[in-house]
Amino acid sequence: MSEAPVTEQEYELDTSWMSTMGEWGMRAEPGKRGLTLEDIRIGSYGELPDISDNMSGHPRGAAQRPDAYRVGGYGVRTLAEIWLDNATFLYEEALQRQWSSATDIPWETVEPLPDEVEEAECLLCTFFNEVEFVAGDVPARWIAQTTPDYLEPRHVLLAQVMDEARHMDVFRKRALANGGGLMRMSGATSGFVGSIDLARDFTEMSTRLHISGEGAVLTMFRMGELFGQNEAEKRMYRLCAQDEARHVAFGVMHLRYLNEACPERREEIHAYLDEAEAQIMAGLQNPAGTQAETSEALAILLGGSKSQYDEGHKKLLVIRRRQLKEYMQRVKTAGFGDRFENGRSTIPAQHAAAY
Amino acid sequence: MMQVFPSHAWFQAVREVYNGDASLHSGGGGACDTTAGLKVGDDGYLMVFEGLECADIRPAGEDEMSEADFIIEMPLALWKEMVANVQENGKADLDHTLNSIDLQQEESIAYSPADDQYRQDLFYRYNQNFQDFFDASSRVETIFDQA
Amino acid sequence: MADEKSGAAAGAATVPAAVAGAAAAAGGTVVEGRPEPSFEWMGLTNQWGVRVKPGEHGLRLGDLNVGIYGEVPEVWDDQTRRPRGALPRPGIPPLPYNLRAKHQMWADCAADLYEEAIQRRWIPATDVPWATLQPLPEAVERALCQVCTEIMQYANTEIEIITYWQDQMSYGYYEVKQYLAAATFDCARHIEVLRKRALANGGGLGLESKGAVNRMILESRGGWTESVVYLYLLRGTFVMQLLRNLLSSAHNDAERVIWSHMIEDHARHLTYGYDHLKYAVTHQEGEASVLQTLLTIGEAMMGAELKDGVLRSAMAIILGGGLEGGRTVGMESYLHLVGDYLRDYLALCDWLGVPRADQLNPSLSKYLEY
């Protein structure tokens, strides 16, 4: 910035806008958690339109101009299709609980491992690196399509995209930190019908991504603390699990809201859950599933070696049981537990068979 | 001063250590809000986290415990093993972190008394804070209740 | 370890299990129990034996670019989610990663900026000393709230255009994708903090932006580079001047923390933007001419937007300390701010190899006298 010259010239000042601003006199007060997004949901600024007609991308509550350009065309424009009651809470939590893969993981504790164990770990890291690509790309696409009137859930998704970037980076770091390397891609995250990134409805996407996909991955991350060979790995998996649990929470709470707000969509949501259970919970995307090569890697890691594969596989079955049980609990919490009671879902049978 | 584990005094001592030293709050922790129940043998404790602090930890009966977001329940011997491990190593070793212990059991050590998975998942969301809390107990001279 | 060739040969025999899953969904048989492991994935790697050690700043993203993992090709043909350096797998359907050339998004600084963004993160709820806000003269409060509203809308535009392109960017250049994830998170923070400021001191939100430049940014469909030209070179350079002047006019510690943190974040965004444009111009023949065309159009839009009385008056009031000051020293300072923006802009264009001084739109060149 250079020095502005001093002048006595008088300029015209347009102050007409001062009488056409949004609701005035707002005085949001910080609480115990500082000044949160929840604290500023006051007056008309806290009112959420059931349907958004914000076509100019303005902040919710801003006064509108008659000559503003329409830039919107937002696909997600109804409250029910994206809202969740604790969005502000999850966003603020995400901000508070960010971490750095560069400096918060004690990389110096990584020590050489037997080749087969290192390979298994690297395969898993390659897989997680790949899986997190989906979890980063897909919410991003939906953010661009969501009206800024629903800034709170949008912000949670923006935090998720950041979290996933961090996960991508930490798994790549682990794969390259201990004498290993990246392995073969899984292909599990590719686009085909029923996959996460081809969803054409936000709730459909969230059901597949947050509840099925990330729910399964959450269990995997937690398992990482069981098979982690050093403090770096344990911490890496633990911190990733924290983030993942927050993403899962988004999915559960959104589905719960939708269930209450739009009961007429229940059958549709059940159809998405049918698909997700058949594909994500069962297939390649789930290392604890029965058909994934990553499940072989997990069994080696859980057993401690290839020769202890059977032992590791037994532990994997315990993981799968937990995974299935927690999935059922989450779907139940979201209000769709009837599918496990009326025979629609095969998950209860799979859970029982896993003993 | 030596504290007996398990006891209210022990948990209070750990709470003071945890709250008093920001270096014990490791990266990846951060502010959290939750009320957790701890079932340690016959004793129950309610542990309240608010923001960056463990705001309270107090003995609690069944009624209060039923209001917790989630309860961590382990056999007393396992609690003692975990705390002893922290005493010996300065923090939980690889097999004695809360998550590791949880995953070594057939069933989870954490559950929601309201059968609400969203609230049970708070154990996962805030896991680092709980781990930091129990790791902080390395600074509390501990003797074990012989019962 | 097996080389790529053998890995590819082994992979050719593998049908992705997701297809088998789909068959199961259609009523096929799923075999439970312990499948016999094949371990056929073992030994399948492009390069083994990599051991990257943490440096004095920890283990950073840029540190991972060793051996083949550091080979960033000029074109990344892979339309799958294959991590760079991982072995491919035949039979995987492509995804619409339409941006697959390095010059379409690359910046050498992306990995470093990503790590810097994480290290320099801040939390508006608790890092801003909100208690230091004090009532301001009505006109100044209105002006500040108006400016907050305007910049919020800019940040929203930035989020929308980045997220529009983000999932079209291939993973060959994952450093850029990761950095942009951090950039959109910064923008979320900016919207959050500006909204909080506007609602925390007796004010409210202002009038929405007319949005000419917002629309131009959002309508840039020719490629991410085009969006960067408008978002960062043309408009972002202006926003930096706004933020710096707002900082110098801050009324309290809360505002000082807000503006100074936003400046840091925004500086990173600009660094990426300028670095990318430089890369594009030096690595893609004809790109400089394309940028000339884009800037000819863009400058006219920017000039039209700067004529709008709302932002200019609001800034003048802030810089002048009120209505009276706004009419004199405030407006003069604002015009000087715009002059500084254009001087920076022209210098950047020269540096990029896209000189604009002789062609600067008259609606903008008039500000150079300030």
Image: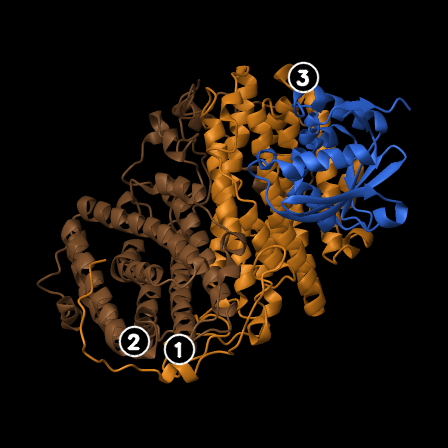
Tell me the tag on residue C139: 1
Q: Position of residue C221 (x, y in %)?
A: 32, 61
The answer to whether the residue labelled 2 contacts the one labelled 1, judged by CB atoms less than 8 Å apart, is yes
The span from disc 3 to disc 2 (Cα, nearest Å) is 78 Å
Specify whether A340 is left or right of A120. right
The span from disc 3 to disc 1 (Cα, nearest Å) is 74 Å
User: Which shade is chain A?
Assistant: orange
Residue in the image at 33% along x and 77% along y: C310
Q: What amino acid is found at the position of numbered circle 1 in the picture?
A: Ala
Tell me the tag on residue A308: 3
Q: Position of residue C40 (x, y in %)?
A: 54, 23
Tell me the tag on residue C326: 2
Residue in the image at 48% along x and 65% along y: C197
Q: What amino acid is found at the position of numbered circle 2 in the picture?
A: Gly
Q: Are marks 3 and 1 on the same chain?
A: no
Specify whether B11 is left or right of C348. right
Q: Are marks 3 and 2 on the same chain?
A: no
| Quarter occupied by residue A265 | bottom right
Number of the front mark, 3 or 1: 1
Number of the front mark, 3 or 2: 2
Chain for disc number 3: A
Q: What amino acid is found at the position of numbered circle 3 in the picture?
A: Gln
Element at badge 1? helix
Q: How many discs mark residues in the rendered view? A: 3
User: Which shade is chain B?
Assistant: blue
Front one among A224 and B53: B53
Residue A81 in sight here: yes
Characterize the local packing of mark 1: few (<14), some (14-19) or many (20 or more) Cα atoms within 10 angstroms.
Answer: some
Q: Position of residue C359 (x, y in %)?
A: 11, 65
Element at badge 2? helix
